[in-house]
Image (cartoon, rainbow, N blue to C red):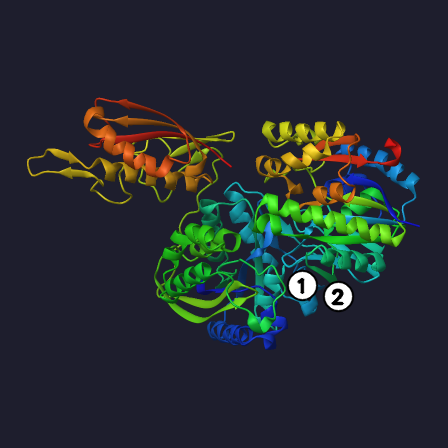
Amino acid sequence: MILKSMIVPGLPQVLLSPEANPGYASLKAAYAKARAEIEEVNPDLILYYSTQWLSVLGYTFQADPKPEWTHVDHNFHYLGSMPYQFRCDSEFASSYAKEVKKLGYHTMLANYRGFPIDTGTIVAQKLLNPENKFLASMVSCNMYAEKAETISLGRAGLQALEASNKKAVVVLVSSLSSRFFIKEIDPKDDHISSAKDDEWNRKICELLGEGRLEDVSQVARDFGREANGDMGFKGMWWLNGICGETNNFQGNFLDYQAIYGTGATVITLTPKQKIVSKKPIEKKQNIVQSESAPEPVGAYPHARREGDFLFLSGVGPRAKGKKEIPGVNVQKDGSIIHDIPLQTRSVIENVKTILESSGSSLDHIVDIQVFLTDMKSQFSAFNKVYEEYFKDIQATRTTVEVGSLPTPIAVEFKVIAKIP
Amino acid sequence: MKGKIVAGVLAPHPPHLVYGENPPQNEPKSECGWENLRWAYERCRKNIKKLKPDVLLVHSPHWMTVVGHHVLGVEKFKGLSVDPIFPHLFRYAYDLTVDVNLSLKIAEEITKEGLLSKVMKNPDFRIDYGTIISLHLINPDWDIPIVSISSNNSPYYFSNEVGQEQMMKLGQATKRAIEASGKRAVLLASNSLSHRHFTWEADIPEDMSKEHIYNHGQYLWDMKMLDLMKAGKAKELLAVMPEFFDMALAEIKAGALTWMLSAMDVPDYPAIVHGYGSVIGTGNAVVEWNPEANQ
């Protein structure tokens, strides 16, 4: 089970030069408070996911029971060396890898002398568990993984914890915004490098402080794009997956500061009730079922990958989990008034959701077929909204009138997109 | 005497090539594998050895820095390089000598170009595996001092074009430093070409029946780039490079090839393509520019 989770920063300034800036010292103090929270719940292990440990071949798990090295950060080597000797839970590493392998992903147990543990994990471990009081476990961040896969990796972690009957604190080591200063700065003058990033960071801190992990996971993609989130902020998907995908946490906001222009926060999340695991989604190479888009109304997927292309099933304006269809206004006499702009907008947003769940985006659409139920009355309103989204994308388009569509809707898109 | 660049090599760093070769420094042992590229390197090694260089300079994407371009400022490094992605293939004991004077001169020239530089002086620093692999594949005897230059993340931070412009300046700074040093230098651009990996691996990594390029689009782009190299059209190559980065997820986005071509004043003579092959889906070529052979 999971006793507690947290997000902490992984840049070395907090560990190696806290005196250089009051913000770094403040983060170190926040780390100490997080450490006290861990000691209070007395876990069997601390499980880390660091955005600085990248893998290509599926996922790697630290399986050396006693990794030992003197590490130097490639960027901030002038801050000093980080000697470490950790105690790791090899048994749990195997259990976690087994769960992930079941999903169809490549896994690797790293039990090699001198295997390079990343700066982020070292910083977090040295500040949260400096005396190796608790066993540690570490899983890599796959550089290609998207949302569904990363959430599944998290879910598999919870299943592995349940199967091994272990109590864990889970730690996401990640910056918020990740826009570094690219010129030498005096650490005393450190601040968030962009006002926009700062605004986004504060919003994320506010949501997490309220315990709204699921909500943060939902906006992670926007955050990643708008605020240059650390590795697209994908770590938040892992944290959400392993923590049961709810907002049911007691959040404890401990700090938010800048490190070399990036956003750094320490926030702990304590579950208000026992976290219930969800079944991880097995990897099916070609089939895409988006968790955010409305469910299909038949036995077909949202999309299918073939080579570098993504073929979407017909997409209407329905909203996920709602009975009412946006832009379909049912009158008392049973007749329907179609709000074409609203339906068109809703269709495009659904297309966007499916594409993003598949690692693509609106920008990568190459061809669209549009189905309208009444060309004469609907085309102009549809076309105006279409232009808002697609003026610069310039996908090819064919628009046809059809007698009816499967649900009482007036607009449907059939889309082909590239996968970048 | 004025120093000069006696050769430049596109010297990719898949750990698989060292693994396939089974040198004594590498712990994991293989049966064989990736011969087209390994033999390409063997041919290139012979050419480089004949040139009797005083120093090998490497630019590797696996020493990535955010503030400026860093150089090694410690003379001796001895350690174990373990690839974090392929630790089962590459755990290599290295022992190397840095030409610190040339490093410092390069840092000075980088600053004169208006770029930022930093000298890495921490003796505990572990040299990145890209640098180690390219150096081994060119000079497994490790009897020539080296200079290692970090990869600034400007193409990722700004744009391909901005990154490329910076690497052109870095190349010129490197050239001036070499000339001032009076040494015969070989430049190694430690990059593959197209760089989309498979996310799975064959049960036997060296099972060559499983090895192929990730997709045909990548392959076509790689061929287009190699054709330009063979035709001596480095200027045209640089012009299409930003597009290549995006179309083939090219590793040379990090700028090593641009740096090298700039330092060699954008050669207009044909390069020697020693070989091309895929490694876990990525496209790799060993390519040599040798000004003396083309005089």
Q: CA distance from mark 1 to mark 2?
A: 25 Å
The front one of B63 and A148 is B63
Residue at mark 1: A66
- Residue B194 shows in this picture: no
For discs 1 and 2, the disc positioned in front in the rendered view:
2
Q: Of the residues shown, which amino acid type is indicated by label 2?
A: Asn
Spot occupied by residue A291 in the image (x, y as percentages of width and height): 37, 44
Spot occupied by residue A234 in the image (x, y as percentages of width and height): 48, 52
Please report contact status of discs 1 and 2: CB closer than 8 Å, yes or no: no
Q: Write down the quadrant of residue B224 in the picture.
A: top right
Q: Write down the quadrant of residue B95 in the picture.
A: bottom right
Which element type, helix, strand or loop, lies under badge 1? loop
Q: Residue at x 57, y 51 (%)?
A: B157
Q: Which mark is residue A404?
A: none
Q: Which mark is residue B122?
A: 2
Q: Of the residues shown, which amino acid type is indicated by label 1?
A: Lys
Q: Is residue B243 above or below residue A204?
A: above
Q: How many marks?
A: 2
- What chain is tagged by disc 2? B
Decide: few, some or many residues near mark 2? Use Cα within 10 Å; few <14, some 14-19, many ≥20: some
Spot occupied by residue B275 in the image (x, y as percentages of width and height): 77, 31
- What chain is tagged by disc 1? A
Spot occupied by residue A67 in the image (x, y as percentages of width and height): 68, 62
- Residue A184 shows in this picture: yes
Which element type, helix, strand or loop, lies under badge 2? loop
Do badges 1 and 2 share one subunit? no
- A319 left or right, relative to A72: left
The front one of A415 and B266 is B266
Decide: few, some or many residues near mark 1? Use Cα within 10 Å; few <14, some 14-19, many ≥20: some
- B62 left or right, relative to B123: left
